[in-house]
Amino acid sequence: MTRVLVVEDEELVRANIVDLLEAEGYETQEASDGEQALHLIWQNPPDLILCDVRMPKLDGFALLSRLSQEPRLRAIPFIFLTARVGREDQRLGMNLGADDYITKPFTRKDLLTAVQRRLEKHRQISETAVHHHAHTVEQALNDLPDDLMAPLQHLLLLSQTLMDTTALPAHVGQIRAQGRELYKTTRQLLKSVRHFVLLNRLLQLKEDLKEVHALRRLVTGSAHEVIREIALSFAEQGERRDDLEVELEPVSLVMGEEWLVNLLECGLEWVFSRSPYGEKITLTGKVLSASRYDLRLSYSPIHPLAEEFFPSSFPDKKPLSFHLMQIILELHEGSFTFTPGPAQSQFRFSLKSQSGERSVFHV
């Protein structure tokens, strides 16, 4: 049943609206001010909100402003109820994301028409979003055979070579080289499997508002040290310690360490696999403000022409690692851009931070 939250400080007006909606088969919730409404919305988000503009404690504009800051709540259809609509008030409401205004006094038809129209529009938008979500999952699943089968086939060939005594290389160094290739291919396969598992976990997490809210309360103190350790680990695994330059300002990030590690691994795996041995990889981090940290990861590409035309390579098909980074950052109120180029390509991450000291952490 469709649930409508009615936020109105005048008890008689609120009761009349609730009676009218319930007579039409809607489930209702009531709040006499914005603070009470916000508490109800967090507990159990409604399908639509009818809200008075002028109220005590937290007025309609302030309530809508709070909701607009939350990705999972900003999409709820929001209709203002007001005795008068000045041009400035209407502009403010629309800029905050209001879907409609109903001027008091209003008729039964006015109210029901506005509610039905906005619910139908929201249903259409939701169906489009679900289709996009399904498309992302379908695309990832379509890529699964290639991501898994190619490394598996390579593993089989290497295993057969090592098992066949007639084809066994005479030189021990060649056996060691075969072992390194086997290890590299196995890591590639393991990375693909982990990425698909992580994608499934993220897509489920996005649907749970309470989990998202809890996620955004996690903080990684001295996050610059975590970033440095992960980057150095990647460099040492690829025997490229001398290629990596790290210069990070100290920061505490509003992101749990687990998710910070997942984010960095996606970016670093991409960079180290697409930059040649001996070329510099730079990782820099700067505190832009008390709440924003700028992290940049730059490298010279192995294939400059392919890198230059990267945007046109997949206009509708981003690599899975890009999808993962995007979702992780959206959940933590951050973002990233990727700027490819023939001489240098760069990831730029905008991360939510807590204030900290400004000395430079350099390796």
Image (cartoon, rainbow, N blue to C red):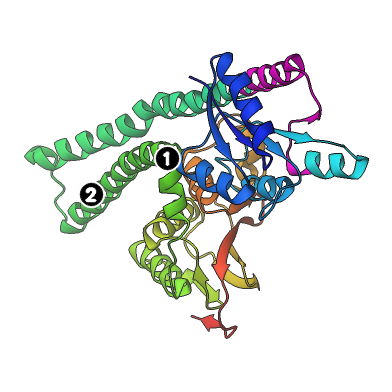
**Of tags 2 and 1, which is closer to the observer?**
1
- Tag count: 2
Q: Secondary structure at mark 1?
A: loop
Query: How far is disc 2 from disc 1 in space, using C-alphas?
Result: 46 Å
Q: Which residue is mark 1?
A: 208
Q: Tag 1 or tag 2, which sits nearer the N-term? A: 2
Q: Camera-side residue: 292 or 285?
A: 292
Tell me the number on the disc at residue 86: none
> Residue furthest toward the left?
165
Instruction: Please report the residue visible at 20 percent of the width from the left and 56 percent of the height from the top.
Output: 176
Q: Camera-side residue: 222 or 3?
A: 3
- The x, y position of residue 94, in whole percent, is 80, 38
* Region in magenta: 95-123
Q: Amino acid at mark 1?
A: Asp
- The x, y position of residue 315, in whole percent, is 63, 31
- The x, y position of residue 100, in whole percent, is 76, 30
